Image: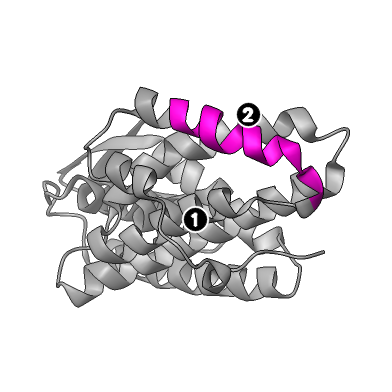
């Protein structure tokens, strides 16, 4: 099965660029996708994914390296549009459906990677998407290791603070901060492993990364207090 790679994309889609830059609304962009791209793609599904779709995806990837995680919020809309569209082809064109799905996963992981590199190169803090993967990872491990659950929850609280951009909880302790830092490092390695796996046709780690990112995004706030030796931690989800 052929999985399309980012370095196979040659052109930038100017309409997608206008949408990312805020020059047109999503409704205008959606109309462009339906009229200019969907109709052409349906004319020849045998060619897998039409060049214009590739150019749209490439545009989001290139912008991720330029403006960081802000582009991922924009990409969520096109991701939903593509999934809703190709789901209609699943029964008649199962191979095409799987190729598109794997390609989308690849693009998302590449955007997270490119955005992380952007954040590091500009000295900016780690952005929400990568933090969400780390939070999801800690949620997965909770109660399954010898680390006290309250320490894991405190680490998640710290990551929520990082995601908000303001450190409001300052008494979590060194252990919780170390756990949070370790989760961020692990999430980066997982993303790299996911990309390597996709190159080999293995999408399992990539799907896990997306699942962790979704779980992490559900955490929106945290409360912590300590009275004498009694600690109270509350994590709020959507």
Asked if residue 7 lies left or right of residue 220, the reply is right
- One can see residue 238 in this view: no
Q: Nearer the viewer, residue 51 or 150?
A: 51
Q: Name the residue under label 2.
A: 84
Residue for point 70% across, 64% down = 3
| Residue 92 rendering spot, x and y as whole percentages | 88, 34
The residue depicted at 63 percent of the width and 29 percent of the height is 84
In the image, which is nearer the foreground, mark 1 or mark 2? 1
When asked about the image quadrant of residue 89, the answer is top right
**Residue shown at the point (26%, 38%) measured from the top left:** 222
Q: What stretch is highlighted in magenta?
A: 31-46
Residue holding disc 1 = 55
Q: How far apart are marks 1 and 2 (CA)?
A: 19 Å
* SS label for mark 1: helix
Above-or-below relation of 49 to 196: above
Work out which quarter of the rendered image holds the N terminus and state it.
Answer: bottom right
Please indicate whether residue 94 sits to the left or right of residue 69 in the image.
right
Q: Residues within 10 Å of mark 1 (few under 14, many from 20)?
A: many
Q: Where is residue 49 in the image (x, y as percent from the top left)?
A: 68, 51
Q: Quadrant of the C terminus?
A: top left
User: Where is residue 210 shown, x and y percent of the image?
Assistant: 55, 50
In the displayed structure, 163 sits above or below 89; it is: below
The quadrant holding residue 66 is: bottom left
């Amino acid at each position: 099965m052929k999985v399309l790679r980012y370095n196979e994309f040659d052109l930038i889609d100017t309409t997608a660029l206008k949408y990312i830059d805020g020059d047109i609304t999503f409704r205008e962009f959606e109309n462009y996708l339906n009229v200019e791209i969907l109709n052409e793609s349906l004319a020849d599904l045998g060619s897998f994914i039409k060049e214009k779709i590739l150019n749209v995806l490439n545009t989001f990837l290139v912008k991720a390296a330029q403006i960081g995680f802000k582009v991922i919020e924009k990409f969520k809309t096109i991701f939903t549009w593509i999934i809703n569209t190709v789901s209609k082809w699943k029964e008649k064109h199962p191979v095409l459906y799987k190729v598109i799905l794997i390609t989308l996963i690849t693009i998302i992981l590449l955007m997270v990677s490119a955005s992380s590199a952007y954040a590091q190169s500009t000295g900016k803090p780690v952005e929400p998407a990568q933090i969400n993967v780390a939070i999801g990872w800690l949620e997965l491990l909770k109660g399954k290791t010898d680390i006290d659950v309250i320490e894991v929850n405190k680490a998640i609280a710290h990551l929520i603070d990082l995601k908000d951009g303001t450190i409001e909880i300052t008494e979590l302790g060194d252990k919780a901060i170390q756990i949070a830092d370790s989760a961020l490092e692990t999430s980066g390695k997982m993303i790299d492993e996911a990309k390597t796996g996709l190159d080999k046709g293995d999408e399992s780690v990539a799907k896990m990364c997306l699942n962790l990112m979704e779980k992490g995004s559900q955490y929106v706030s945290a409360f912590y207090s300590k009275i004498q030796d009694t600690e109270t931690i509350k994590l709020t989800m959507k």
